[in-house]
Amino acid sequence: MRTTFPRLLLEHAAKRPQAAAMREKEYGIWQTTTWQQMADQVRHLAGGLHQLGLQRGEHLVVIGANRPRLYATMLAAQSLGAIPVPLYQDAVAAECVFPINNAEVRFAVVEDQEQVDKMLEIREQCPQLAHILFDDPRGLRNYDEPGLAGLREVMAAGKVFSDEHPDFFQEEIDKAQPDDVAAMFFTSGTTGNPKGVVHTHYTLLNRAEVGAKFDKLTEKEEVLAYLPPAWIGQNIFSYAQWLACGYVVNCPESSSTVMIDLKEIGPTYYFAPPRIFEGMLTSVMIRMEDAGWIKRKMFHAFMDVARRVGPQLMDGKSVGLVDRLLYGLGNLLVYGPLRNNLGFSRVRVAYTAGEAIGPDLFSFYRSIGINLKQLYGSTETAVFVCLQPDHEVRADTVGVPCEGVEIKLADNGEILVRSPGLLKEYYKNEKATREVLDAEGWYHTSDAGFIDASGHLKIIDRVKDVGRIKGGANDGAMFAPKYVENKLKFFSHIKEAVAFGDGRDRVCVMINIDFDAVGNWAERRNLPYTGYTDLAGKPEVYQLIKECVEKVNADLSRDALLAGSQIHRFLVLHKELDADDGELTRTNKVRRGFIGDKYAVLVDALYEGKTEQYIETQVKFEDGRTGKVSATLKLMDAKTFAPVQKAA
């Protein structure tokens, strides 16, 4: 698509001025912004930002949840040739310092008082930060800081400017070219400082258009924008594709009302990482365990039918008449009400990405009639690299290369990608750019995988994380930690797992239980507990987790390549891994190296064969205070299995 974001906005406003562009829930009521109203907001914001001195080519950070005025601000910046840089709203103040200084940011546009306080906290470290503009004025009436102003004030001043200079807005938009920089996204930074990924209007809109064409998206779609706009996945689905297709983006009132808002909107196009789908299924199973005997019996009976028949029907395959009738009855009594309860009654296509999704979890959603598919991509590729065509959907692959994409494998198994959606560069980091973009235009993904016989891409792990077992009975065996971790996380009782084994004689893991799922399991067994640490240390919980670990081992024993990655020892951590404590990235990916260093005493204890180990850990609370959590953890052995020899 050889155009720019602001031009697409004006096209929609000209063709469908009164059609809904966005909705925002305020005080329990959905408020609609039409395309004409959005265009007017953008025009006035552009005038206001211009008067404040925003220059072409300059960066502007945007921090907050999905809000119409924040989207309008990004469009206003792009209209002036400036570059919006969305940052994670749940990042602590110190995490914003590097991106703001790296991009020499003078303008910060934030959602509310919480984000204003963060910017004021780091202002001394970011002396160039001259303007802090906020959307929600609640709690900010008595603030008196230089450069602090509300977006409404900026818009009011911009309206006066636009009325006096009626051609200014269009003239600025006309200066932009598709190959100009449109946005910058900072990577989550699993090691070292995050890198600014630079994308042009063309790279983002090309991938947005390809994805829309693949799934036949139209202006009639309804999308719920509830994930951080700083994550390129959310940005592509609710910003780039929103402008490419002209559909309606709905913004929930708050993170706590997302599930209610999801049911009210009933989106037709949905996107979420696996952890969201895991959480939904966990809540369903908890409710069913608490239901009456008859309802529980009916649910499990029809779910057996769904697992047997549903995926075949979803893939367009024929099934027997009796099975079809049973599935139809199940749809009336169980699957339909369940889809409605989840907010998926109108979903035409749903995507998951970011991490591997468990086959059982994946099959559950498809079996009840939800067209859940996987995609493969990254910040650097503007998301869309591989997509799963309808009727070719499998849990163990991420689909086929989509339009314009070439894939090849390096000698070490690394996946290389050539695509119109590749990053222009890493900002101010020529060395890192050269490391991932070679002279022939191939992007080095750092992911290891292969293309199977049907042309679908299968991901194994990160190249740097694929290691070898050294010593012992499995000397030289491949070790893929992420593969092992994901297998563990397929169980509803396990929230996170961190596997160790590279260069060691066996695999050991640290596990986080899912507090809600295990808490419900404990309550149904009249097992008392006082909190996460107490519950995680219960002998009954250890036995529950041990059963999960041994099921994973049994599964791994059937894989000739990874049978040596079976888990020999494990422990259940005394606290949940947390991004605020540096253990996860802001996209909830495990920082394995950091965790290995932080909990070195536990890693050593696992490999030394100890049965228990005392640990004291510093934690950071939501209000910024720090404290300590201590416990004596149990370390437990798990049963391993002889590799299964396949028949010749």
Image (cartoon, rainbow, N blue to C red):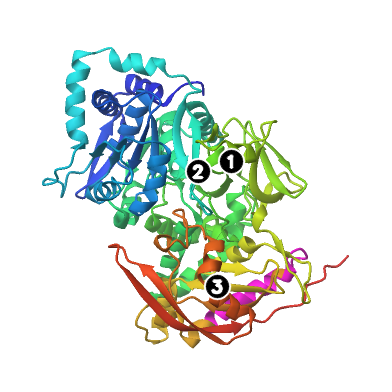
Magenta stretch, overall SS: helix
Judging depth in this view, the residue of 242 and 339 nearest the camera is: 242
* Magenta stretch in the rendered image: 543-564
- Please report the residue visible at 31 percent of the width from the left and 32 percent of the height from the top: 72
- Please report the residue visible at 58 percent of the width from the left and 75 percent of the height from the top: 603
Q: Which mark is residue 432?
A: 1
Distance from Cα at disc 3 to Cα at disc 1: 30 Å
Q: Earlier in the sequence, mark 3 or mark 1?
A: 1
Q: Which mark is residue 600?
A: 3
Q: Secondary structure at mark 2?
A: loop
Q: Is residue 56 above or below residue 594?
A: above
Q: Position of residue 310 (x, y in %)?
A: 57, 57
Q: Position of residue 23 (x, y in %)?
A: 29, 39
Residue to which mark 2 is pinned: 195
- Please report the residue visible at 43 percent of the width from the left and 56 percent of the height from the top: 339
Q: Secondary structure at mark 1?
A: helix
Q: Earlier in the sequence, mark 1 or mark 2?
A: 2
Amino acid under label 2?
A: Lys
